[in-house]
Image (cartoon, grey):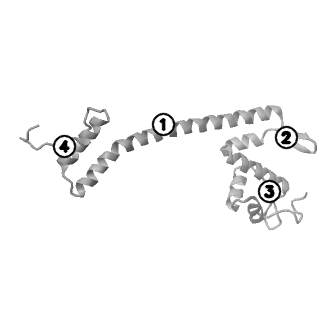
Amino acid sequence: MSKDSPAALTVRDAAERLGVTPRTLKYYEERGLVSPTRSAGRYRLYDEEDLKRFGRILRLRSLGFSLHGITEMLKRPLEAVDGGHRYSTESLQQIRDAIAQQVDALDARIEAMRREFKEAQRLRAELSPDLDYLERRLAGENADALLEQRRNALAKAGRTNTPPSAKRSRKPGEPT
């Protein structure tokens, strides 16, 4: 198909068809990922091959590939199969390796997030009694009675150490 044929699309029409902004298409062109032809009026014109290439770029981006990585992948040869094109075995292996690296990176992020989540839950559990104490104190409850309740709850839970938040500051000269 000739890019000057009526089937060629302007940047706005191509962007709408692909579900992206015209700026995205222009950016990919600036990065050398696509080279549309220009009309006599210097408008970008995209044909079906350009749209297929954009589709491939968008799918690779959705998998987490960088634009540099996509540029490298697009340089790889396609083999002709039944009127279509497929990646060569070597290219498939390289793409598989790149995706495996992405999956490994995601697994590491997930594990780090799980550790962070557990730490956040632990910290929340530590702070909740402090918040409860402060809210009850602000509501006018007696500090000594609240501290005694806290000590009893800790003892009942099998903890003998009183956390610093359950200890009351003593005034100078006050008996311990």
Label 4 crowding class (10 Å Cα cut-off): few <14, some 14-19, many 20+?
few
Q: For residue 66, what is the image quadrant? A: top right
- The CA distance from mark 1 to mark 4 is 33 Å
Residue at 75 percent of width and 58 percent of height: 18
Residue 90: % across, % down: 80, 31
| For the residues bearing labels 4 and 3, Cβ distance under 8 angstroms | no
> Which of pointers 2 and 3 lies earlier in the amino acid sequence?
3
Q: Is residue 12 left or right of residue 131?
A: right
Please say whether residue 127 is visible from this viewpoint: yes
Residue at 65 percent of width and 34 percent of height: 101
The type of residue carrying mark 4 is Arg
- Checking the image for residue 115, the label placed there is 1
Q: For residue 91, what is the image quadrant? A: top right
Check disc 4 and report the residue beneath it.
Answer: 168
Q: Residue furthest front?
A: 156
> Which of pointers 3 and 1 lies earlier in the amino acid sequence?
3
Check disc 3 and report the residue beneath it.
Answer: 36
The type of residue carrying mark 2 is Arg
